[in-house]
Amino acid sequence: MTLTHVNHAPDAELGRDRRDVPISRPAERAHLADASMHIAETQCAKSGPDCSHGRTACADCKVRLHSICAALDPDELNALEALSHPTRYGARSTLFSQDETAESVFNVTEGMVRLYKLLPDGRRQIVGFALPGDFLGLALMDRFGVSAEAVGDVTVCRFPRKAFAAYLDTKPHLLRRLHEFAGHELSLAQEQMVLLGRRSAEERVASFLVSLRERLARIGQKSVTLALPMSRQDIADFLGLTIETVSRTMTRLAREKTILVVPDGVRLLRPEQLESIAAR
Amino acid sequence: MTLTHVNHAPDAELGRDRRDVPISRPAERAHLADASMHIAETQCAKSGPDCSHGRTACADCKVRLHSICAALDPDELNALEALSHPTRYGARSTLFSQDETAESVFNVTEGMVRLYKLLPDGRRQIVGFALPGDFLGLALMDRFGVSAEAVGDVTVCRFPRKAFAAYLDTKPHLLRRLHEFAGHELSLAQEQMVLLGRRSAEERVASFLVSLRERLARIGQKSVTLALPMSRQDIADFLGLTIETVSRTMTRLAREKTILVVPDGVRLLRPEQLESIAAR
DNA sequence: CGGCCCACTTGACGCAAATCAATGTAGCAG
DNA sequence: CTGCTACATTGATTTGCGTCAAGTGGGCCG
């Protein structure tokens, strides 16, 4: 049963948060140098420790087992919860910016965050996409080394960095868990260096799709239909390519029936073919 | 006083370990796919915990203050020393290989180590050069994610991974220190992603020289004359370029009197010019 | 409904870096 | 000294991807 080449597949649950939260358009031009915008955070007004309207207990947290919190027993979870500020960020809003003092660290619970660095002339390199369960501010350093923006709407557990670090000092196994996350992150970064330094455009795109699928599978979202909530420009800036090259490459993969391009996503028709292109 | 364009400057203390330790030549062809060679380690025969012939005490360690060991008090230092196996590796020998079970972790005390990943077809990406004070095996994972080879002769403190991890469990502040190192490493990796994804050949070379100088300065080797013990191929594989492009770029920088190419190194004639080319 | 905007795609062309090919040079063995 | 080997430089040519520019289609607003 051969699949026909259509542009719109009847796939549910895809959806780039593009129309909602029409927050200042210029933000989308972030590819240019300014990056100075700090879109108002969609977060609760009082930012004290009990910003808990509609609060969901950590015990019910959908990403707990994939996050650093899996290292904690119920009592410890409560203690950490006391420090946490569940916070929402609207699509395209800024969680934090490069070089800014790190007041908070974050546990992503929903949505996707792009992490990037800008060169003075505006060139942008996305160094990663954070998914639910991922931790932002791993290094616990005084200042952030990268900027972070919500791709679509995002919810996080935000922790004041100092309080979090202090708690960490009392819970070595939590630090251990954090360190494991750092090791994993480093490993992804090294894979990405191979991609950026030594792979062709087609290999980059294939590799990107395959590894995004793997990451989603690890957090329980197994599917051959991959949601791509980020823009083509984001993908290009992640893969060290231009938007045109990404577009052409995806078109070619689609023409060869390896993938099927759908609105805000891609269906992997022949995943094994993609893996072999990715060359790993 | 203009500097003349000479090929050999009267600079001391440079020196690629090329002639010494003529260990199996085929190793130099490591750029091709085989990578299967495991050159016999130049390490002490009995590998028990007291492989201490000619052992230098940690207290005298030249890199202690730059390594993870700076987090330890004298007693702790002794305890860790009891686990350590000071080991030498000859030029071009392998410390460990990608995907191999991680039996040991390492603290580099002397020399330079290249860390790299290979694609199945032999393409190589060097993900970093480890210097004295750097720690190898940070992630403490079961298997190494990269391969490590001595560039010139190298000395390390080697620790059995499990014993090290066990000791770590009793010393949270050491884990904290290790985590700081991981954060630093991650930060370097992200910088490198920007380099590989978004910088031109000239910017890459300039950036490489500037940041190597900074790293050396941080461990006390401040100098405008930079030793480059690694080959041009290594530099190319680190910068995501070909050897020819690296060579041409260095020649151009030299022609413009920004650097002076000397055997096994480079003198930075106009560091500020390099920094502005690096565009940071 | 019509027009605008924006994200994306597609095509034509140009260029930076890769590839292919000599040539130069230092270290070492005989 | 001579030849050999490995590394590095330099030149000629090709090419993959970037740049520039035009075209498409969906969403949204007046």
Image (cartoon, coloured by chain):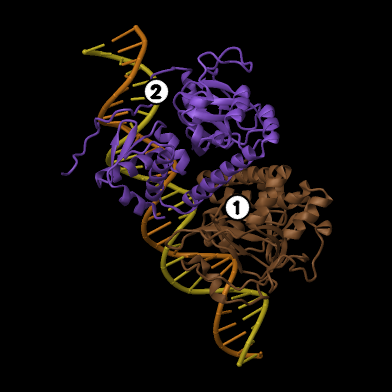
Chain colours: A brown, B purple, C orange, D yellow
Q: Which residue is mark 2?
A: B18
Looking at the rendered structure, the kind of residue marked 1 is Val
**Quadrant of the snapshot with the N terminus of chain B:** top left
Q: Which residue is mark 1?
A: A205
Q: Chain of mark 2?
A: B
Vertical order, B26 against A100 (above or below) = above
- Residue B122 appears in the figure: no
Residue with the most extreme left position: B1
Residue A58: percent from the left, percent from the top? Answer: 80, 58
Marks 2 and 1, how far apart in space? Answer: 40 Å
Mark 1 nearby-residue class (10 Å; few <14, some 14–19, many ≥20): many
Mark 2 nearby-residue class (10 Å; few <14, some 14–19, many ≥20): some
Q: Is residue B78 left or right of residue A263?
A: left
Q: Compare residues A96 and B100 and report the one nearer the observer.
A: A96
Q: Quadrant of residue B21?
A: top left
Residue B16: percent from the left, percent from the top? Answer: 38, 27
Residue B147: percent from the left, percent from the top? Answer: 57, 32
Vertical order, A182 against A59 (above or below) = above
Vertical order, A196 against A246 (above or below) = above
Q: Is residue A274 left or right of residue B189?
A: right
Same-subunit check for callouts 2 and 1: no
Q: Is residue A214 left or right of residue B271?
A: right
Q: For the residues carrying marks 2 and 1, which lies nearer the camera in this image?
A: 2
* Mark 1, secondary structure of its residue: helix
Q: Chain of mark 1?
A: A
* Mark 2, secondary structure of its residue: loop
